Image: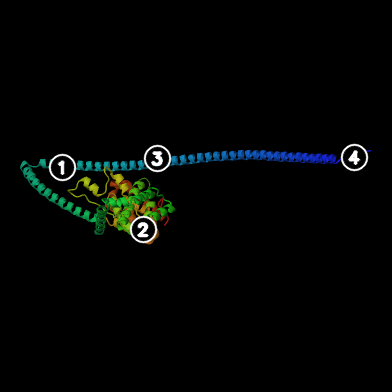
Amino acid sequence: MPKPVRQEDLDFVSCENDRYESEIFKWKNDRLVEAIIQEEFEFAKETYKAKAIAHKKYEAAEQKRLNADKEWQKYWEQVAAKYEKEKLERKRQFESEQAKWRQMADEYDRKIKALKQAEEDRKKREEEAKRQEILKIQNKKLEQEAALAEEKRKKEEALKAAENAKKVQDNAKTVTNDNTKNLVTDEILKQEQLYRNMLKTIHDKFSKNPQLKSATTEARKNITLGLNILTNGRAEIIKIATQFDAMLRSHKNNSDVYYFLINYIAKGVVKHAEVDVVSKESAAFPFAHLCVLICTQHTEFMEFLMTRLVKKCPYVLPRYYARQANQSLEEYKKQMSYKPNEDEDAYVNRMYLKNPYGIDNAWTYLARLMNLRPQKITPSLLYICLKITGSSLLRAYNQHALKLFSVVYKSYVQRPPSEVNSLLTSAPAAMSRLRTLLEDASKKGQFPVPEGQTPD
């Protein structure tokens, strides 16, 4: 007979079953946690691996970029070196060509002097031969007749010498008066006096005024900076002109500061152009373009600019000077705006006309120049004026310009008068350049557009 089941046994079995179920659940839960941890570990491992690969790719790309930058820098260094080398070569060629022309001019001068000397020697020999012949004839005469003739001859020669001396003196006065009359017109004298008075006013009002200088320190720095970075780029020129215009407008309510800054810009333009244009003629155009843009908004600027130009170069008017009898060479050169220890070639090169405003002024300039008696510097002034403005004059005046050019061509190439022919000896290089320019223009029917000229 089976043993009866007790309640305690049933409770024990139920408790053991619950404990078994609890252990099973705990075991499953532990396995699940382990699986999640293992999965997270694998994910982290793959993520780290992916990051390492991406980092390597980034480093490789960065190294490639650095290598490309190095190659690019190396390329530009080569380009810069090549440009500098070409620049030095062009400068060397220019200096060589300049030396060649100077040597040719000197050689031409030496030949002319040698021919003159030979002609003078020939005349002296002929005069000596004639004198000896006269002496032989006179020696054949009787002593009494010879004595009387000699006495009479001496008296006649003395009277003739006195008359000749008086004629020479009168002629010298006439020539001096004619030269003075042909050196400058009344209109130009009035303009010159106007500019001199204006320059004196500028000096009296601005030069010794520390308040104006302190009040415009920043503006003057910006003006100097703008002129230093001025190039032939049209956008750059307009940008600088706009900056100057805004600066001047901001001070227009104070007339002293306004005119002080206008004078400072004009003085700076002439100073920078004088330095830059000596080495490169085309450097004049950005300064000229800038001046035109400023004048369109501030008409007063042109008077200040012309005052500065006339101070540096009297030939802008044009104006010639005759040396006075009681004037020293140093005073005469100072009057003509020579620099200390400046030779004539350097002076002529610096005096070349730089036309900074309307083309009608070039017409006026040429007309005035052709109405004056030619001087040694005249061929240089004509050459640079026609070289810079010839094409613009032809566009502006057409047939009228051709007539003016024809007058210049006939006067200096086709049928030059004696006073122009004399310049072949005193200024052979300048005459050669002018002749070549005029002959080329005559053949082609136009003047070449100068290098560096900005568009109209």
Label 4: element kind: loop
Q: CA distance from mark 3 to mark 2?
A: 46 Å
Q: Quadrant of the C terminus?
A: bottom left
Specify whether 298 is left or right of 139. Answer: right
Q: Amino acid at mark 2?
A: Arg
- Per the image, the residue denoted by label 3 is 92
Q: Nearer the viewer, residue 80 or 333?
A: 80
Specify whether 404 is left or right of 15. Answer: left
Mark 4 and mark 3 lie on one chain; the one further toward the N terminus is 4
Q: Are marks 2 and 1 in contact (CB under 8 Å)?
A: no
- Per the image, the residue denoted by label 2 is 249
Q: CA distance from mark 2 to mark 1?
A: 82 Å
- Per the image, the residue denoted by label 4 is 4
Specify whether 96 is left or right of 116. Answer: right
**Numbered label attached to residue 371:** none
- Horizontal and vertical percent position of residue 306: 30, 55
Instruction: Assess disc 4: are there few (<14), some (14-19) or many (≥20) residues with their C-alpha within 10 Å of its C-alpha.
Output: few
Mark 2 and mark 1 lie on one chain; the one further toward the N terminus is 1
Residue 420 is at least partly visible in this image:
no
Q: Nearer the viewer, residue 22 or 68?
A: 22
Instruction: Assess disc 1: are there few (<14), some (14-19) or many (≥20) residues with their C-alpha within 10 Å of its C-alpha.
Output: few
Label 1: element kind: helix
- Horizontal and vertical percent position of residue 240: 40, 53
Residue 19 is at least partly visible in this image:
yes
Q: Amino acid at mark 4?
A: Pro
Instruction: Assess disc 3: are there few (<14), some (14-19) or many (≥20) residues with their C-alpha within 10 Å of its C-alpha.
Output: few
- Per the image, the residue denoted by label 1 is 131
Residue 88, picture quadrant: top left
Eye-nearest disc, 4 or 2: 4
Question: Can you name the residue that lies furthest to the left here?
Answer: 144
Q: CA distance from mark 4 to mark 2?
A: 123 Å
- Horizontal and vertical percent position of residue 8: 84, 40
